[in-house]
Amino acid sequence: MTRMVAVIGGSGFLGTRLCELLRAAGQPFVIVDKRVSESFPDECVVADVRDADALERALPSDAVWINLAAEHRDDVTPRSLYHDVNVEGARNICRAAAVKDVRSIVFTSSVACYGNAPAGTGEDGAIAPFNDYGRTKFLAEEVFREWQGESPATRSLAIVRPTVIFGERNRGNVYNLLRQIASGRFVMVGAGRNVKSMAYVGNVAAFLAFLAGEERGNVLVNYVDEPSIDMNTLVGIARQELAKPAETRLRLPVWLGMALGRLADVAAAVSGRKLPVSAVRVRKFVSDSHFAAGYSRLGFQPPFTMLDALRRTVRFEFASGNVEGEVFYTE
């Protein structure tokens, strides 16, 4: 692939990793984001997806567009931002694509579209989001599908629904879990047998680069790194890498963990501070989130195994003792 790649929302965690891959491959790219990329300032054009005119001016024609822009944190305020960025932003992108006769878009959605789905849910799973993020991500998918459906013979759309993405320099829920283990303050809520699907940033970035070079018409695919593992296994891998005792000694029943999460919500509301603990985050921790992915049918093979990905992340963040450069707060 030699065409320009426009990475919308490319200044963030996943976008930065994707652009590193594109640069290494000699692939021309431009980042369009509401803030300048620290890693690629010379390749960045500032534009907000909510500003249709600025977005149209910033985005190139004769290019593949990858949309990573989203409001996704649990604590977004006002809540209308989910719709403004995720849905109306998608409309603005599609309007610009129609004006510039862009033929190929890759959109990162989310498995949050499925809500609390049965284990092993694949791309044909029922859409039942339980939060504004999942709801607006699916609405954005519909916007992109409408764009592709206007000219199905000439327009290519790939929709990727990743599960929770982790990796080096990310300050999301997986990092917070690993940090608690590294510090010795980790408390298991529940029995730890709930299964978690996760996705390593290096693999997701490689998959997006793969899709940008393929125009397959209309593609919908989950992204999950296999094997999905339960919380006890995840914690055990981290403990082993950190040379910690294998056994998690302090465990709380789910009801108590949820009660503490609700108490933290009240404290956050009263103080106006955003706390690392909340009822939503406890619910996420104790729930199953096991999804199936069909990317192998497309011929893609992840460059990293799940075990390698976890070990790389733990070593980088907690064993090296010297994490320099940009970090990304995603949850």
Image: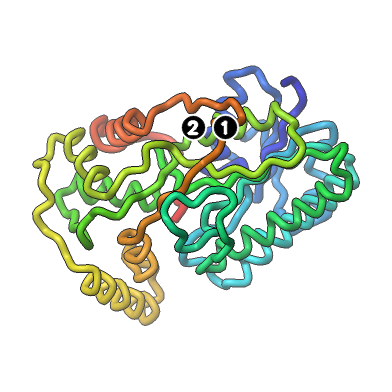
In terms of image quadrants, where is residue 2? top right
Q: Is residue 75 above or below residue 104?
A: below
Amino acid carrying label 2: it is Asn
Q: Is residue 173 above or below residue 316?
A: below
In terms of image quadrants, where is residue 234? top left
Q: Is residue 92 left or right of residue 109?
A: right
In terms of image quadrants, where is residue 271? bottom left
Q: Nearer the viewer, residue 76 or 136?
A: 136
Amino acid carrying label 1: it is Phe
Residue 117: x and y in percent read: 47, 60
Which residue is pictured at 87% across the width and 38% down the height? 153
Residue matched to label 1: 207
Q: Is residue 117 above or below residue 8?
A: below
Q: Note whether residue 311 is visible.
A: yes
Which residue is pictured at 77% across the width and 25% down the height? 3
Q: Is residue 118 left or right of residue 10?
A: left
Q: Note whether residue 56 is visible.
A: no
Answer yes or no: do the residues labelled 1 and 2 have beta carbons within 8 Å? yes
Which residue is pictured at 36% across the width and 82% down the height? 270
Tell me, for residue 23, which label it has, or none.
none
Q: Residues within 10 Å of mark 2 (few under 14, many from 20)?
A: many
Which residue is pictured at 45% across the width and 44% down the height? 165
Question: Disc 1 versus disc 2: distance between alpha carbons?
Answer: 6 Å
Q: Nearer the viewer, residue 149 or 235?
A: 149
* Element assignment for label 2: helix
Residue matched to label 2: 203
* Element assignment for label 1: helix
